[in-house]
Image (tube, helix red, strand yellow):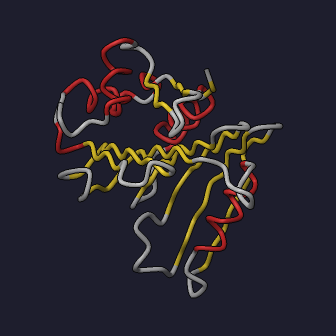
Amino acid sequence: MKALGKAFRIALATAPFLLALASPAHAEKLSFDHRLYPPLKEVLDSGNQDMVLFDSSNPRYIIDRIAITGKSAKQWTEALEIIARTPMRDMKTAADWMAELRAKADPKCAYDAKIIAQDDISITFERRMTDCPDERAPIAIYRIIASKRSLFLLAVLEKAEPSAEARKQWLDLLASAHLE
């Protein structure tokens, strides 16, 4: 399991029904029920290291990517990306991060974002980019959760339209995400 990040390995070993990721400052954890999307549970249970990519090269911006379908975490057609970052002066809320994602989108691409749910500390939204051949995921569903010490993003990345059942399961998984 060398390819898995330390926090990721610990979470799998100590909480088989919940997947948790420690924040860069290790102050908080984001937990969610990975069983709510059975294909994700299957990938995690398989132990296939090629399907998980962990990048902690920047301790203020830690990324885990889990490929659900595809050859690997680098060549996927459906994936879950988990990002933990330290808040900064201009990046403190879930809405701030959503705005940053929009600002970084290719201006030549059609961009449509629809908020699905929002509360004081989180925002869940779906983003679709069309007429954008270079976009790595034309369809994405995000949940961003913010606290004073951490910002977390769960991103469901899709290269093709998910089935209605898969979309419902992903939304249930995102809704289960909470800070501990």
User: Residue 162 versus residue 155: which sits nearer the camera?
Assistant: 155
**In-front residue for pair 52/25:** 25
Residue 158: % across, % down: 42, 55
Tell me the quarter of the picture where residue 88 sits. Answer: bottom right
- The residue positioned 34% from the left and 21% from the top of the image is 10
Q: Residue furthest bottom?
A: 108
Q: Residue at x 47, y 25 (%)?
A: 36
Position of 53 with respect to 145 (left or right) is left
Figure disc tally: 0
85 over 22 or under it: above or below: below
Quarter of the image where one finds residue 96: bottom right
Give percent across and percent down for residue 45.
24, 23
30 or 62, which is in the foreground?
62
Q: Residue 7 at what x, y percent from top left? A: 38, 29
Q: Residue at image x 63%, y 43%?
A: 151
Where residue 113 appears, x then y in whole percent? Answer: 68, 62
Give left or right: position of 42 versus 154.
Answer: left
Please indicate whether residue 6 sits to the left or right of residue 167 in the image. left
For the N terminus, which image quadrant? top left
Residue 119 lies, with reference to residue 44, above or below; the image says below
Residue displayed at 20% across by 51% down: 72
Image quadrant containing the C terminus: top right
